[in-house]
């Protein structure tokens, strides 16, 4: 962070742009790095009540990795292109079969990792573990701003959708709602999210989560608007 701040300051000065006062930059770096070091100390000590759960650390690392891959790499752009319009992507030179294979293989790896974390936390396993969780996963993605037609969505948005579903599940359990009614409610939430997404696409609008998370995903210079066709995007990149 210090090296990046110094480089950015020197670049701005070389271009003749206005820069912050030196003491402002130093104070900001000291405070931010002190917070990072303190958080690192809490993680390392592992004292009860202060240590961060290991699954949370794994989730944070995965979000950073996949957020970078989806926004800053070629394979990430190819995944968006194939999801939006497979035929247009193939005509532009994207190997859709290779992309599909990599995506499916990656999801298998993540599913195996999730299974190991679940078994590790519950210290038990059974043949029916995970049955019915597909509804939660699909609902989380659509609530997070992903399009039904594909080609749109962010990692951060999916995390937000997952948190919404987790809060919903926890709230229903605290209220003592039965399993059957819980499935109905979650199904209605999924139906509402899909209907809202389809309506917004027909009106040329973005989803609510998409508007909130647009700065955390692809930048406005590199990311197409949700109403922009995938064919136009691939043509610009070519």
Image (spheres, rainbow, N blue to C red):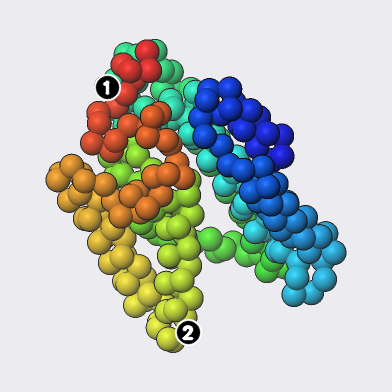
Residue 101 position, x and y percent, is 50, 29
The one of 117 and 192 positioned closer to us in this rendering:
192
Is disc 2 placed on a helix, strand or loop?
Answer: helix
Q: Relative to 68, is 208 above or below?
A: below
Q: Residues within 10 Å of mark 2 (few under 14, many from 20)?
A: few
Residue placed most toward the observer, 12 or 108: 12
Report whether 210 appears left or right of 128: left
Q: Position of residue 219 (x, y in %)?
A: 42, 35
Mark 1: give few (<14), some (14-19) or many (20+) Cα within 10 Å.
few
Image-based side of 94 in relation to 131, left or right: left
Q: Marks 1 and 2, how far apart in space?
A: 48 Å
Q: Position of residue 36 (x, y in %)?
A: 72, 54
Most distant residue in the bottom direction:
176
Disc number at residue 185? none
Residue 197, above or below 180 = above
Query: Helix, strand or loop at disc 1?
Result: helix
Identify the residue shown where x is 44% and y is 51%. Answer: 158
Up the image or down, 216 lies above or below 127; here it is above
User: What residue appears at the point 40 percent right and 28 percent down from the top-left corner?
Assistant: 222
Q: Residue at x 40, y 83 (%)?
A: 177
- Percent from the top left, x then y, of residue 15? 53, 23
Dividing the image into 4 quarters, which one contains the C terminus? top left
Earlier along the polypeptide chain: callout 1 or callout 2? Answer: 2
Q: Circle 2 is placed at which residue position?
A: 174
Query: What residue appears at the point 15 percent right and 44 percent down from the top-left corner?
Result: 202
Query: Are the residues tagged 1 and 2 within 8 Å (C-beta)?
Result: no
Marks 1, 2: nearer the viewer? 1
List the residue tagged with mark 1: 232
* Residue 145 at least partly seen: no
Quadrant hosting residue 180: bottom left
């Amino acid at each position: 962070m210090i090296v990046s701040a110094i480089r950015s300051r020197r670049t701005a000065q070389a271009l003749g742009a206005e820069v912050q006062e030196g003491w402002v930059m130093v104070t900001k770096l000291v405070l931010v790095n002190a917070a990072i070091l303190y958080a690192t100390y809490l993680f390392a000590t592992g004292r009860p009540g202060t240590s961060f759960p290991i699954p949370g650390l794994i989730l944070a690392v995965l979000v950073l990795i996949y957020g970078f891959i989806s926004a800053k790499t070629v394979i990430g752009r190819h995944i968006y292109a194939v999801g939006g319009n497979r035929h247009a992507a193939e005509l532009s030179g994207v190997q859709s079969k290779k992309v599909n294979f990599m995506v499916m293989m990656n999801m298998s790896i993540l599913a195996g990792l999730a299974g190991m974390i679940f078994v590790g936390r519950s210290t038990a396993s059974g043949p029916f573990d995970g049955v019915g969780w597909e509804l939660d996963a699909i609902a989380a993605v659509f609530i997070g701003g992903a399009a039904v037609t594909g080609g749109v969505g962010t990692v951060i948005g999916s995390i937000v959708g997952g948190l919404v579903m987790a809060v919903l599940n926890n709230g229903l359990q605290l209220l003592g709602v039965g399993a059957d009614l819980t499935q109905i409610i979650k199904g209605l939430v999924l139906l509402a999210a899909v209907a809202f997404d389809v309506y917004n696409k027909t009106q040329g609008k973005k989803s609510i989560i998409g508007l909130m998370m647009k700065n955390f995903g692809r930048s406005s210079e590199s990311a197409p608007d949700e109403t922009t066709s995938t064919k136009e995007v691939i043509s610009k990149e070519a």
